[in-house]
Amino acid sequence: MSDSDALIESLEQLIAKKRQIKQGTMQVLLTGKQRLPGFAGRWERVRAGDVGSFRGGNGFPIAFQGDVLGDYPFFKVSDMNNDGNETFMSNSNNWISERAKRRLGATVFPEGSIIFAKVGAAVFLERKKILAKPSCIDNNLAAFVLDRSRAEIRFVHHALLETKFGSLVSTTALPSLNGAVLSQIPLELPPLAEQEAIAEFLSDMDTELAELETRLAKTRQLKQGMMQELLTGRIRLV
């Protein structure tokens, strides 16, 4: 087991190091303190409301919930925990038909909208995800719909991950986010081509981290399986 423990420890240390490197890289690339090779255009300081709009979701009565097939996924806050929804939201526990969508008067948010919890304790979890397809969201969620001629989705997503929405909640009994306040979030935007290059660079780092975390999880599972076999006598040491 010592070999497994050593491998697990080395992977944990490597992941921690990679996360620190990514955090530092984000801080310099998302602010223009460091430029990628070949880019020298002027950065523009804007408010979030200048390059997109914040809109809340719709009520989702229980009578319409439970379908696993349909025309649109209807996401709830809990869906953010689903496997496969780490960054891009595609796996929903509820789907609705076009007919149900019309009956509910539900808004269909476009692919690429950035969604997040807008009320309750979930706001403080600071989860921001990207819709992988046109989708509906319930009224505990809100979406930031970008003007894609001015802002690149993944670049803005990375920037918003660095913004603590929990510090923007209204001081009421139930924590909530206000669209007018969210619209004032400052953003530093380089030309669109540079936004795309930075987003690609950071996404490559995310992919590397995800692969290491998958390897770590498999190694832990393998160790757990070996322990169960040894402790029950199903496998005997030579």
Image (spheres, rainbow, N blue to C red):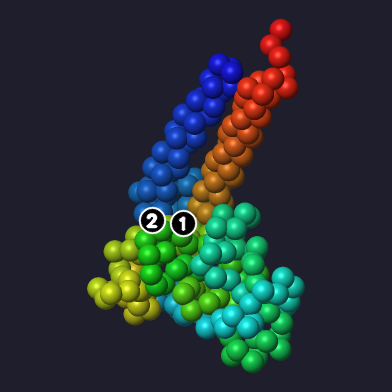
Q: What residue type is labelled 1?
A: His
* Residue 191 numbered tag: none
In the shown orientation, is residue 10 left or right of residue 95? left
**Mark 1 neighbour class, 10 Å CA radius: few under 14, some 14 to 19, many 20 or more:** some
Q: Is mark 2 on a helix, strand or loop?
A: loop
- Give the labeled residue for mark 2: 162
In the shown orientation, is residue 230 left or right of residue 162? right
Q: Visible in this render: residue 135? A: no
Residue 229: percent from left, percent from top: 68, 24
In the shown orientation, is residue 96 left or right of residue 55? right
Quadrant for residue 176, please give it: bottom left
Q: How many marks?
A: 2
User: Which residue does the image show at 64% across and 66% down from the upper left?
Assistant: 92
Q: Visible in this render: residue 94? A: yes
Q: What is the distance, in whole Å, between disc 2 and disc 1 at their CAs? A: 7 Å
Q: What residue type is labelled 2?
A: Glu
Q: In this view, does 230 lie above or below 177?
A: above
Residue 212: percent from left, percent from top: 58, 36
User: Which residue does the image show at 71% across and 14% down from the upper left?
Assistant: 236
- Give the labeled residue for mark 1: 158
Q: What element carries label 1?
A: helix
**Mark 2 neighbour class, 10 Å CA radius: few under 14, some 14 to 19, many 20 or more:** some
Looking at the image, do the residues carrying marks 2 and 1 touch, with CB atoms under 8 Å apart?
A: yes
Q: Which of 148 and 74 is in front in this view?
A: 74
